[in-house]
Amino acid sequence: MTFDGLTGAAASIPENLAIENKVYHALDALNTGLVTWKYSNVFVTTNTLGIQRGINVVPNSTVNVGPGTFNEDVDVNKNGIHLLGSGIDVTYLRGTYAGNNNGSAACLFLNANDILVQDMTVTRDYGADLTAWYACTKNQGITFGNSKTGNTLNRVRVADQRNAVYVNNAQDYTITNSIIENNRTGFPDGQ
């Protein structure tokens, strides 16, 4: 399969994100099949159903996330997922205020093993109202799930959360080249 003369393997990430916007499939609508053009990769843009949908429709694969703001909470619940943004200054995962993220208060819940999250900002825009900020029960930026192992954050910014990164008895985790700023608590270690 080619798009404008390119195969998925030959196309760059930005070119593959542009291809995604031309394909109507499982990332765009429920009850449709998944079309892939680069082995073990899916591409999420602001025109798709979001990051969680990308994780839901792939096996242990790479979820490439394009530039933009994605207003959702994400539960990475499959081993071996690589969640790759387009850069901390262009890909924003902005958590919600309501709902339940599989029992977690996190914007991004690392609920499986061997997950890589890279090149994005994880935030929750509480605005200027401190009363609402303190009252919100969705108070974690990123949670490393209980007894999960081998998870990595690389080049991730966590900002504007009550608690930036919460490690819930997780083992063998790595955080490198990341920025934790403008949070009430940066790194409450629950071990």
Image: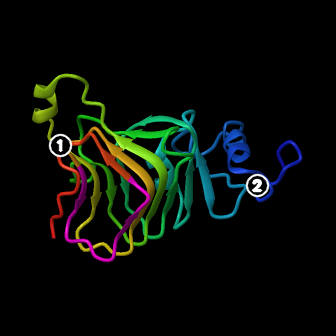
Question: Where does residue 122 sit, x and y in percent of width and height?
Answer: 37, 44
Q: Is residue 176 magenta?
A: yes
- Quarter in which the C terminus is drawn: bottom left
Q: Is residue 77 above or below residue 132?
A: below
Question: Where does residue 20 sit, x and y in percent of width and height?
Answer: 67, 42
Disc 1 target residue: 184
Task: Decide if residue 140 is on the left or right side of residue 111.
Answer: left
Task: Decide if residue 18 is on the left or right side of residue 119.
Answer: right
Q: Is residue 8 magenta?
A: no
The amino acid type of the residue labelled 2 equals: Gly
Residue 8 tag number: 2
Q: Residue at x 71, y 47 (%)?
A: 16
Task: Decide if residue 169 is on the left or right side of residue 7.
Answer: left
Question: Where does residue 175 sit, x and y in percent of width and height?
Answer: 37, 64
Q: Is residue 23 above or below residue 77?
A: above
Residue 49 in view of the camera? no
Tag count in the figure? 2
Give the spatial CA distance, label 2 vs label 1.
42 Å
Task: Decide if residue 27 is on the left or right side of residue 117.
Answer: right
- What stretch of residues is rendered in magenta? 164-178
Q: Is residue 176 above or below residue 107?
A: below
**Secondary structure under badge 2?**
loop
